[in-house]
Structure formats: structure tokens, C-alpha cells
Image (cartoon, rainbow, N blue to C red):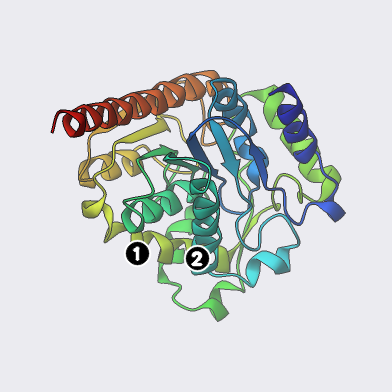
């Protein structure tokens, strides 16, 4: 396992020229976790959670979504369907080695996770949603963000650019400055792009619109981890998802983090809650299989 984690650390420190695909995978048992990064981000956002789950013996796969990890033009040329298809391909790849799969995601990644759960009910046994973002309505968002809802075309959206919040979604000063320095030094390619092109926010809105229509179909167990102080997405994002899923939902509200909960002060709590959630699903499925086996033997 240590060798695999070393490979993971190396992958997260790639130079911009080599960061076109920062996908990584940590081999483990037959229970797998697919972790999907956020908008304009990379799998490095999921590294701490991935390592924590890998230490518990799970197979962890962190794909790079289509268009991410490269230049700004790379991502602007993609649509939400491209992102979804790349995540679904990663799910299919993980299922080759794992009988049970839980899909987790941060921000945009959590919304893609909802799509995967709705469209692949036989392949996804649970969903873990970190800072699910339906609306970009956190306290640090610029006042003009609300007017972006009036934008309906890619042409108009391409004229706009949304800068990162000064907080970078991270409350911990040490981690925030590390990320800020990394973004400045590498033009963000290994940790994501600096700022968000308007066209990507438009695609995000379209992804969310499609996801809302699917929530009532998702009956797999769900974990939602969201911060009360989220600077990008208010807590009402999490409560909306919780209220509309056709599934039992564990909602964990953090009190000392911002949006990037997988990196921030309470990242250890995120790992602990996710590990317990995955273990509970694996144990439940194992018990069901055992009962079915005994019933067949008795017949």
C-alpha cells in the first residue's frame, strides 16, 4: 500500500506540462470508491480522502474529468456531457475490479455522482457528496453572480470570467497559502485553473438542471458533508438534496471549514465519516449476500 500512496503523492505534484491527466488509482479490495473532483479542479483535491480510504483497504479511483488538468482552452471546449461521460467511463473501469462501488464527489463532482447513481443503479451502491453545489450562493461570491442566471448562451457566457474568492474555499490559512502558491507557480494546471470561465458555470447550471430531475430516482444510501460556513455554496444546497433524494441520507454539517472540505481544517472528519459510510454499505451488502447464499443452500 505504501508504494501505491507514494505514486499518488507524485501524481499530485506533476508539472503543468505533464498534468494533462492527473488521474490516479490506489489498489485495494473488492469495495471501490470513485472520487470526482470539482469544477476547474483536479484529482489532487481528493488526495487526502483517497489516502484515508486506501488505508482502510478500499480500492480508490480518482479520474480527471474531460478538459480538466490542462489549459483553459481545454476546459472551455468541453460540455457537462463530456464531464459526465469521462466519469462514467471511470466507473465502468472501477467495476471491473470491484463488486461494490460508492461514488463520491466534491462540488461539481458530487452532482456528477448523483447522475451516475441515477443512471447506473446496478453499479453504484452509495453516494458521498462533499459540498454539493446546486447554486453558487456562498457568502464570498461577488454580488453580480446572481445575475449570471440571465445568461443562456455559450457565446455570452464566454465573455465572462469569475475570479476565485480570496478565501479559495479554504478556511485553514496554512493550506490556503499552500494552494495559492501552487496555483501561482504552476498556472494552476496540477491543482486546477485560476478563476472559472463563464462558459463552465453555464455548463454547471445545465448539469444541475438535469440532476434535479433525477433526485427522486436515487434510492442508494447517501452521505452529505457540507460546511455551515461554505463560502461558495450555502448550506441550503445540502438540505435541498437531502430533502429530495429517495434514499436514507446522513447529513454531516461541519462548523470550522469552508467549501473545500476535502482539504480544509476538518478533512480528518470527512475521511472518518466517509470511511464509516463505506464500511456500513459494504457490511450491509455482505450480510445480504450471506443470507441469499444460505437460502439457496437450504433450498
Q: Residue 157 in the image: x percent, y percent?
A: 55, 72
**Quarter of image, res 196:** bottom right
Pick the front one: 54 or 14: 54
Q: Is residue 205 visible in the rendered structure shown here?
A: yes
Residue 202 left/right relative to 168: left
Which residue is under mark 1?
A: 210
| Above/below status of 204 relative to 151 | above
Q: Residue 156 in the image: x percent, y percent?
A: 55, 78
Point out the tag, 1 or 2, that comes first from the N-terminus: 2
Q: Residue at x 43, y 49 (%)?
A: 113
| Above/below status of 144 relative to 249 | below
Residue 46 left/right relative to 218: right
Q: Residue at x 66, y 54 (%)?
A: 195
Q: Tell whether label 2 touches label 1 (CB within 8 Å).
A: yes
Secondary structure beneath label 1: helix
**Quarter of image, res 176:** top right
Secondary structure beneath label 2: helix
Q: Residue 129 in the image: x percent, y percent?
A: 41, 39
Q: Residue furthest left?
A: 299
Residue 251 left/right relative to 57: left
Amino acid at each position: 500500500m505504501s508504494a501505491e500512496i507514494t505514486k499518488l503523492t507524485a501524481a499530485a505534484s506533476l508539472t503543468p506540462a505533464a498534468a494533462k491527466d492527473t488521474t490516479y488509482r490506489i489498489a485495494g479490495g473488492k469495495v471501490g470508491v470513485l472520487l470526482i473532483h470539482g469544477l476547474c479542479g483536479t484529482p489532487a483535491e481528493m488526495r487526502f480522502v483517497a489516502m484515508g480510504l486506501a488505508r482502510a483497504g478500499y480500492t480508490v479511483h480518482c479520474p480527471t474529468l474531460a478538459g480538466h488538468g490542462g489549459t483553459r482552452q481545454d476546459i472551455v471546449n468541453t460540455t457537462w456531457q463530456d464531464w459526465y461521460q469521462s466519469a462514467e467511463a471511470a466507473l465502468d473501469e472501477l467495476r471491473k475490479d470491484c463488486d461494490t462501488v460508492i461514488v463520491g464527489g466534491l462540488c461539481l463532482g458530487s452532482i456528477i455522482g448523483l447522475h451516475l447513481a441515477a443512471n447506473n443503479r446496478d453499479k453504484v451502491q452509495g453516494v458521498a457528496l462533499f459540498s454539493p453545489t446546486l447554486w453558487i450562493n456562498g457568502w464570498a461570491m461577488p454580488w453580480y453572480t446572481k445575475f449570471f442566471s440571465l445568461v443562456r448562451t455559450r457565446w455570452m457566457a464566454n465573455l465572462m470570467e469569475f475570479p476565485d474568492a480570496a478565501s479559495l474555499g479554504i478556511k485553514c490559512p496554512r493550506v490556503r497559502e499552500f494552494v495559492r502558491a501552487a496555483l501561482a507557480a504552476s498556472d494552476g494546471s496540477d491543482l486546477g485553473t485560476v478563476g472559472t470561465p463563464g462558459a463552465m458555470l453555464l455548463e454547471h447550471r445545465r448539469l444541475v438542471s438535469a440532476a434535479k430531475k433525477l433526485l427522486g430516482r436515487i434510492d442508494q444510501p447517501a452521505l452529505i458533508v457540507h460546511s455551515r460556513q461554505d463560502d461558495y455554496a450555502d448550506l441550503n444546497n445540502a438540505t435541498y438534496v437531502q430533502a429530495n433524494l429517495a434514499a436514507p441520507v446522513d447529513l454531516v454539517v461541519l462548523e470550522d471549514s469552508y467549501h473545500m472540505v476535502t482539504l480544509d481544517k476538518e478533512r480528518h472528519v470527512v475521511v472518518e465519516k466517509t470511511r464509516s459510510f463505506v464500511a456500513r454499505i459494504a457490511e450491509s451488502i455482505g450480510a445480504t449476500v450471506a443470507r441469499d447464499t444460505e437460502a439457496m443452500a437450504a433450498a
